[in-house]
C-alpha cells in the first residue's frame, strides 16, 4: 500500500505490470555491479539522473527497490513513509520506463511499422495499457478525474484517444509516463534534497514547515543490506514482481 496522489492504494493490473517490468529491468542491470570492488561507482546505464537515487550503492538500491515494490504492489498493513529516498526511487522507476521506450523507438525507427516484431512495441504497449488503467482510478476529492481527457495532445474531434502503439513520437510517450508518475507522486520535493541538507538546521526546519514537508523527509536512510542479504532480497522482490501479469 502506498500513499499516492490518488489516495492510499496498491497498484493493480496494467499499472502494476509496468512498474514490475521496470523494477525487474533495473535489478538486472544492478546485478552486474554487485561484485565489483568499487560498488559505489555504478555504470551510466544504471543512472537515472535523479541524484538522491543515483547516490546510492547497488546494494542500497536493491534494498530500496524491494521496499518500494512491496509497498506499491502488495497489500501491506502499513504504508511506507514518504521520503526523498522512497519518492526518488519511484521517479527512477518511471525514468527507466521512459528510457526503455526511447531505446525501443530508436532501435526500430528505420524499420517499417507494418510487420514489426512484437518486441518492437513491448514497452509502448505496456505504457499504453497502464495509462488506460488509470481511468479506473477515481480521485477521492474529484470523482470526475479521468486521465484520458487531461492531455490536449490526445484530443481528436472532441474524443480522448491515446497514441497508437507504433507511434515513434517520444515526446508523446513522455507525457503519458509523466502522468503515470504523477498518479503516484505528490510532487518533486526529493529534487530539493541537497538544498535542504546543506543549510543551517533551523533555516531548513523553517523552510520545510513553510513548504509543508515532513520533518524527516530528507533524513530517511535507505536500506543497506549485507552482502549475504542482497540475493535473498532480489529473490523476494522478483517473487513480488513476477506474480503480476505481463
Image (spheres, grey):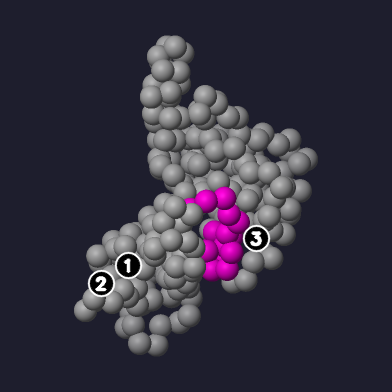
Q: Is residue 195 above or below residue 48?
A: above
Q: Earlier in the sequence, mark 1 or mark 2?
A: 1
Range drawn in magenta = 6-21
Quadrant assignment, res 209 = top left
Local secondary structure at mark 1: helix
* Residue drawn where x is 38% and y is 24% of the image: 210
Label 1–label 2 contact, CB within 8 A: yes
Q: Earlier in the sequence, mark 3 or mark 2?
A: 2
State left or right for residue 35 relative to residue 203: right
CA neighbours of label 1 inside 10 A, class few (<14), some (14 to 19), many (20+)? some
Q: Earlier in the sequence, mark 3 or mark 1?
A: 1
The residue indicated by pointer 2 is 155
In this rendered view, identify the residue nearer to me: 33 or 200: 200
Local secondary structure at mark 2: strand
Quadrant assignment, res 229 = top right
Cα distance in 3D space between marks 3 and 1:
30 Å
Which label sits in the foreground, 3 or 1? 1
Residue 96 seen in the current view: no
Residue 188 x, y percent position in the rendering: 40, 40
Label 3–label 2 contact, CB within 8 A: no
CA neighbours of label 3 inside 10 A, class few (<14), some (14 to 19), many (20+)? many
Which label sits in the foreground, 3 or 2? 2
* Residue drawn where x is 62% and y is 41% of the image: 80
Q: Looking at the rendered structure, which numbered label has been put on residue 241?
A: 3
Q: As drawn, which residue projects farthest toward the bottom?
A: 115
Residue 83 x, y percent position in the rendering: 53, 35
* Residue drawn where x is 45% and y is 82% of the image: 117
Cα distance in 3D space between marks 1 and 2:
7 Å
Residue 30 x, y percent position in the rendering: 59, 48
The residue indicated by pointer 1 is 149
Amino acid at each position: 500500500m502506498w500513499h499516492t496522489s490518488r489516495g492510499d492504494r496498491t497498484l493493480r493490473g496494467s499499472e502494476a505490470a509496468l512498474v514490475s517490468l521496470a523494477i525487474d529491468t533495473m535489478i538486472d542491470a544492478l546485478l552486474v555491479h554487485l561484485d565489483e570492488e568499487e560498488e559505489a561507482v555504478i555504470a551510466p546505464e544504471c543512472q537515472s539522473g535523479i541524484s538522491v537515487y543515483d547516490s546510492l550503492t547497488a546494494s542500497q538500491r536493491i534494498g530500496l527497490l524491494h521496499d518500494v515494490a512491496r509497498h506499491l504492489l502488495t497489500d501491506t498493513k502499513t504504508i511506507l513513509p514518504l521520503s526523498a529516498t522512497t519518492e526518488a526511487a519511484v521517479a527512477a522507476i518511471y525514468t527507466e520506463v521512459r528510457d526503455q521506450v526511447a531505446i525501443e523507438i530508436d532501435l526500430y525507427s528505420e524499420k517499417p511499422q507494418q510487420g514489426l516484431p512484437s518486441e518492437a512495441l513491448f514497452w509502448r504497449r505496456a505504457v499504453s495499457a497502464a495509462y488506460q488503467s488509470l481511468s479506473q482510478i477515481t480521485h477521492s476529492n474529484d470523482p470526475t478525474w479521468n486521465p484520458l481527457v487531461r492531455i490536449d495532445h490526445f484530443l481528436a474531434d472532441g474524443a480522448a484517444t491515446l497514441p497508437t502503439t507504433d507511434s515513434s513520437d517520444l515526446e508523446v510517450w513522455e507525457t503519458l509516463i509523466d502522468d503515470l508518475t504523477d498518479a503516484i507522486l505528490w510532487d518533486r520535493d526529493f529534487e530539493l534534497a541537497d538544498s535542504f541538507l546543506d543549510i543551517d538546521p533551523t533555516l531548513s526546519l523553517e523552510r520545510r514547515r513553510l513548504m509543508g514537508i515532513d520533518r524527516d523527509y530528507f533524513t530517511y536512510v535507505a536500506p543497506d543490506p549485507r552482502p549475504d542479504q542482497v540475493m535473498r532480497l532480489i529473490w523476494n522482490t522478483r517473487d513480488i514482481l513476477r506474480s503480476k501479469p505481463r
